[in-house]
Image (cartoon, rainbow, N blue to C red):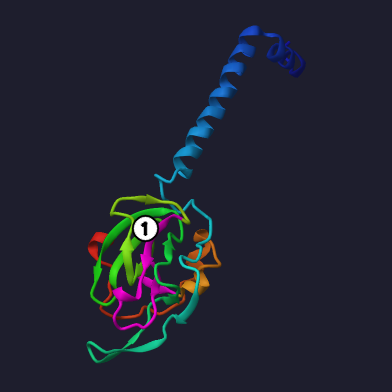
Amino acid sequence: MFNKRSLKFNLFKNPSVKAVKLLFFPAVISLIFIALSLFCSPESVSAQYTAPFIKPLEGGIITGFRQEYFDEEKQVSRMHTGIDICAEDGSSVVAAGNGKVVYVGFSPIGGRTIVIRHNEKIRTTYLNIAECFVSTGDRVLQGDIIAAISAEDDPSSLSPHLHFGIIYDGYYLDPEDVLNIDYSSISKYIVLEYVENDFKIQAEWK
């Protein structure tokens, strides 16, 4: 009669079963490591990344999110879509998180601009930069130096600063709030009203 005791005995005493076990478990472990490498590699930027953003530039915030300011060139009032961080001339700007550089170019209201895509919906924008150290298509890790700032690149300002913005699925977020939360929970904080202005997400950023 085949019972639990004979089954237990056969599993441990049958050489063929033991051989299968010895081959099966290492194969499973290998598959797990391969899967982890695919999801965690900087080459695969996805929502699986849960580290919080870091501040891209050390310095004081001189203009806050949604703060109203006057556009001297167009003579209109605007709503600020990010934060301005002031620092010394030549200070380095770093990537706020792992991602892919999807745009390096010129913005009519922010001068030289870099956009990094962190997953399907999240972008960070870096404006008023003097030097770009990355190109479109580059993969970057959190903390990598991507640019430098200078007052010469922004004649309207007496001090060099970085305009840092965070866009989630077409919505501008307050960077001061987002710096303290995870990518995985960011959707819970989409409570900000979309700010209309002429700084749209361009097609090549998507």
- Compare residues 23 and 64 and report the one nearer the observer: 64
Identified at 29% across, 54% down, the residue is 135
Q: Which residue matches tag 1?
A: 117
Position of residue 200 measured from the top left corner of the image (x, y, whole percent): 27, 72
Instruction: Give the residue at the far top of this rendering.
Output: 15
Determine the residue positioned at 57% across, 21% down. 24
Can I make out residue 169 in this image?
no
Direction right: furthest residue: 5
Amino acid tagged 1 = Arg
Residue at 28% x, 60% y: name it.
103
Magenta stretch holds residue 149: yes
SS category of the residue bearing label 1: strand
User: Residue 104 appears in which quarter of the rendering?
Assistant: bottom left
**37 lies above or below 93:** above
Residue span colored magenta = 144-173
Q: Position of residue 133 (x, y in %)?
A: 34, 56
Residue 164 quadrant: bottom left
Left or right of 73 in this view: 176: right
Image coords of residue 192 (percent x, y): 44, 78
The quadrant the C terminus occupies is bottom left
Q: How many marks?
A: 1
Q: Is residue 36 above or below residue 57?
A: above
Q: Is residue 43 magenta?
A: no
Q: Dividing the image into 4 quarters, which one contains the N terminus?
A: top right
Q: At which x and y percent is residue 131?
A: 32, 63
Q: Is residue 2 left or right of residue 53?
A: right
Question: For this rendering, which residue is in front, 15 or 204?
Answer: 204
Q: Residue at x 50, y 39 (%)?
A: 36
On the question of residue 30 being in view, the answer is: yes
Q: Hey, which quadrant is residue 72 in on the image?
A: bottom left
